[in-house]
Image (tube, grey):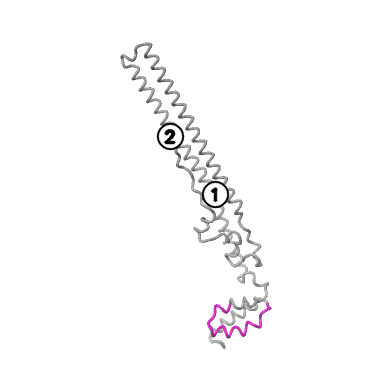
Amino acid sequence: MANGYTTEFTSIQDLLSSQGYDMSALQDPGSLYGFGKGTPYGKFFRPFDVSGYNQAQSSLRELEQNLLTNVSQRFSAATTGLQSQLGTASSKIFGEAGRTGFGASGASERRREQAYETGMERFGETARQTRASYTGVQEQIGTKLGQLEGSLFDYLGGVAQTGLQITSMDPTGGSSGKMTTQQDIDSLLSNLSAEQRSAFSSIATPLIGQPYQVTLDAFKDFMGNQQGGGMYG
């Protein structure tokens, strides 16, 4: 009996892609929120167990195959048994007809029809039970697969929550303990117009090697002067 109940398993890469992520979201999750490996807060983000996830998915696929095979084998055995019973019943009717003359009166034909109808009813019931078993396997695997995929999305949600918590506690993103580099200054300059870059560069360049928070404060003051029409306005 063809079952047609095989579950479609989606790869972890495709699941991530459907949500706008790639594998880096699992390998270096903190980088999604500016806290990647090597940053002060990178240690608060643990990589996802991709290997364990794939192994669990593979085990589910194997379990489903074993369960479906078991149902199929039971159906095949039941069908063979019904066919054997029907054949035995027909042979018995033919034998009795030869001894009693039922054939001439049509009684044996009626008995054969009744035996066939009974056999078909039993076959129909067996097929119904088999379909129910296939559906049961599908529901069982679907529930487990949903739980597995849910663990992936729970993980991503947890990463987002951790990122937001760190940002709320330290808006500098862990920069309070680092020293200013030229790359930091270039990043700030990229937010300014050409005229503003020239003015802020003269302020920020001497701050290289100083605590980054000092540079952030200088940038904040600079932008405040720009907006308030101060000396750089």
**What residue is rendered at 47% in x and 32% in y?**
76
Q: Main secondary structure of the magenta part?
A: helix
141 relative position to 203: left or right: left
Q: Nearer the viewer, residue 21 or 214?
A: 21
Q: Residue furthest bottom?
A: 231
Q: Could you say where residue 200 lies in the image, as x and y percent from the top left? A: 59, 83
Which quadrant would residue 93 be assigned to in this image?
top left
180 vs 150: above or below:
below
Tag count: 2
Which quadrant would residue 112 be assigned to in this image?
top left
Bounds of the magenta span? 188-210
| Separation of marks 1 and 2 at Cα, in angstroms | 29 Å
153 vs 88: above or below:
below
180 vs 38: above or below:
below
Disc 2 target residue: 128
State yes or no: residue 207 in magenta.
yes
Q: Secondary structure at mark 1?
A: helix
**What residue is rendered at 40% in x and 15% in y?**
95
77 vs 191: above or below:
above
Q: Could you say where residue 189 lies in the image, as x and y percent from the top left? A: 57, 79
Disc 1 target residue: 147
Three-letter code, disc 2: Arg
Q: Could you say where residue 102 lies in the image, as x and y percent from the top left? A: 34, 14
Q: Secondary structure at mark 2?
A: helix
Q: Nearer the viewer, mark 1 or mark 2?
A: 2
Q: Earlier in the sequence, mark 1 or mark 2?
A: 2
Q: Quadrant of the N terminus?
A: top left
State yes or no: residue 62 in magenta.
no
Q: Nearer the viewer, residue 103 or 201?
A: 103
Three-letter code, disc 1: Gln
